[in-house]
Amino acid sequence: MDKLVIKGGRPLVGRIQVSGAKNATLPVMAATLLTRGRNRLLNVPNLRDVRTMGELLATLGAKVNQRGNKVFIDTSDALGHEAPYDLVKTMRASVVTLGPLVAKAGLARVSLPGGCAIGERPIDQHLKGLEAMGCKIELDDGYVVAKANRLKGADITMDLVTVTGTENLMMAAVLAKGTTVIRNAAREPEVVDLAQALIAAGADITGAGTSTIQVKGVGELRPLDHRVMSDRIEAGTFMVAAGITRGELTLVDAPLEHLTAVVGKLKEAGLRFQNTPKGVMVSARRAPKPVSIITGPYPGFPTDLQAQVMALLTLSNGSSMIQETIFENRMMHVGELRRLGARIELTGSTAVVGGVRRLSGARVMATDLRASACLVLAGLAAEGETHISRVYHLDRGYERIDQKLSAAGAAIRRKKDK
Ligand code: EPU
């Protein structure tokens, strides 16, 4: 298993290219199951989760071929219907194959994902929506078995806002008979990206990006030919890297239009943003000011950047409050940040972060993807060496992060963890 060793205290300066978005790529890959033919996806990040989704599609009979940031998925012979436990347990997002499989094959057997490090994460809303569309759902040996001859359009109100739930139902509705309305839908940009990929292939979808999405079923879809949007969470992570090291980074292809809540909070904390012809330049000269943050569904502050911004605020000149409202167990980084000298009081899912003047390097352990990113950021600012073990979490969602950071001046090395 690899670990990262970071010698902190160097301001990061330079230009960083933002990659394609993991959370847009995964559902679009699953959506290829709605087609029969050769799909082409561009700007696909080279990540472990993307490879896992590729493996899953391959077990379903698709031919998957990744060349650099292009992925070709030939679904001509994709007749399988089972997403096995071994793959789903390594990546929850595998559940987005459920909607496309039942829509196209009439049958899906998808392992229940189970809980994960950040929370219980049930999929009841996905199942409720599919049932409303006429799907028979049974549980068998830890698998969801969903069957339908042809799904029927339905008017569905989600009990809560769920990103992959909205994506699953939108994909299922594309080939259903009649019109489906999804109310209280997630408005995340990744939902819009998926809708655009589907619309370009012949789907009839309106309202993606609002809380009511309408899908008129069509007979078939052409293969997808889609360029994946930029990763807003990766871009936000690099913004914090500029701020926490008091450096100056120009981010190429940062999707600022999807980061208004984040940029607003980072400006409040004192980071400076300047649009340049090459990209947005993010810089900071002094300690961040304290700010309060509550995570929320888009366009609120993303839970996927909560841990990273907490790293920044550990060095602020006052006390900040951070409240996590999406996942019940997404504060695992707090204990690790404390090992680096941060002062944080945690009550339930609310953290009060009292600023300290400096962090100092230590051995820490990554617990999930975004917690890992938080520890990398803290390590970049800490005095001395920080050793982060279990970086495989990081490799699930950040393309070549150590190379990108070292090109901007970070002293970061990958080593085998003994
Ligand atoms: N929920 C339910 N029932 C459901 C579905 C969700 O109770 O049927 C709850 C969840 O337990 C959670 C809340 O609703 O408390 C929101 O969960 P959501 O379904 O929106 O999350 P998700 O779709 O499983 C996606 C991202 C996550 C991101 C969340 C929130 C993908 C592949 N994953 O997960 O990304 O944190 O939305 O924005 O799109 C990450 O990239 O690190 C990551 C975890």
Image (cartoon, rainbow, N blue to C red):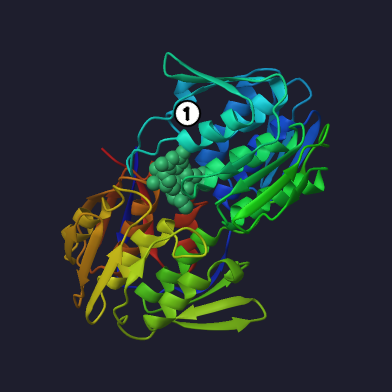
Quarter holding the N terminus is: top left
Q: Quadrant of the C terminus?
A: top left
Residue 8 appears at what percent x and percent y?
A: 30, 67
Of residues 378 and 224, the one nearer the viewer is 224
As helix, strand or loop, the secondary structure at mark 1 comes to helix
Q: Position of residue 35 (x, y in %)?
A: 77, 31
Residue 400 position, x and y percent, is 51, 52
Note whether residue 173 is visible.
Answer: yes
Instruction: Name the residue at the front extreme.
Output: 155
Give the residue furthest to the top.
141
Relative height, residue 192 to residue 110 (above, below):
below
Residue at screen point 61% across, 38% down = 169
Decide if residue 10 is on the left or right side of residue 27: left
Q: Is residue 276 above or below residue 46?
A: below
Image height check: is 227 above or below 93? below
The amino acid marked with disc number 1 is Val
Instruction: Identify the residue position indicated by label 1 in the image.
Output: 88
Q: Quadrant of residue 11?
A: bottom left
Spot occupied by residue 407 in the image (x, y as percentages of width and height): 50, 65
Q: Residue at x 30, y 70 (%)?
A: 381
